[in-house]
Image: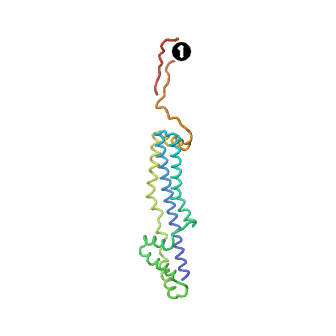
Amino acid sequence: MQEEYSILIEKLRSFVRKYYQNLLIRGLILCFSSLSVAIILFAVLEYFGNFGVLTRTFLFWLFAILSGALFFLFVLIPILRLARLTRQLTDDEAAKIIGRHFPEVEDRLLNVLQLKKQNNGNLPLLEASIKQKASELRPIPFVKAVDFFENKRYLKYILIPVVIVCALYLSGKVSIITESSARIIDHQTEYTPPKPFEVHLSNDKLECVQHQDFLLEIQKQ
């Protein structure tokens, strides 16, 4: 009985590990796409707003807090649980998740776990029942309840920032992101807004007779 039950528990542990690995993969995709969109959004706001030190400082720390929160939620928590440094799924919780993918398994799996909790080692009939049920569940691949390829539906979120950056690059306006982001990072420096146009003198000489009119020729570029 002990061998059959140990194999069952090890299969549950394997499922839990794959469950958190799947959460980590999904979290990395969502974290990267969310932060990429946030960088583009903040950069565009700075590009058109030409904000002062106070507003850029606010944007800088808002992005820092947002980055930390998303990393903690989507990446760090799955890592900590995968490493068993924080609470993992209990056997009963894992059995319920497996039951969503294998409906015929949930009741039997939960029943085995409950019988094991009730068994004090002095009930031969109960031990025999646990062994029988655990043996019936042995061929079922619990880890297949988690499918890594399901995360491909989240890849579309990565395309959003990639398409935006490619469009800006091809149009020669990628500086909207690069220069604006640099100003947000260097948020404590005061920047002078760029001039809407430049003026160039067309006169060959800038000399005239005192008190006489002088025609100054300029070109706007």
Residue 65 position in % (x across, y down): 52, 52
Is 76 placed above or below 219 here?
Answer: below
Residue at screen point 47% across, 73% down: 95
Q: Nearer the viewer, residue 99 or 189?
A: 189
The disc labelled 1 sits on which kind of residue? Glu
Q: Nearer the viewer, residue 44 or 60?
A: 60
Is 174 placed above or below 196 here?
Answer: below
| Mark 1 neighbour class, 10 Å CA radius: few under 14, some 14 to 19, many 20 or more | few
Residue 126 position in % (x across, y down): 50, 86
Residue 14 position in % (x across, y down): 53, 70
Is 210 placed above or below 69 here?
Answer: above
Q: Which residue extends farthest front?
A: 54
Residue 107 position in % (x across, y down): 43, 77
The image quadrant where one finds the N terminus is bottom right
Identify residue for label 1: 207
Q: Nearer the viewer, residue 210 or 21?
A: 210
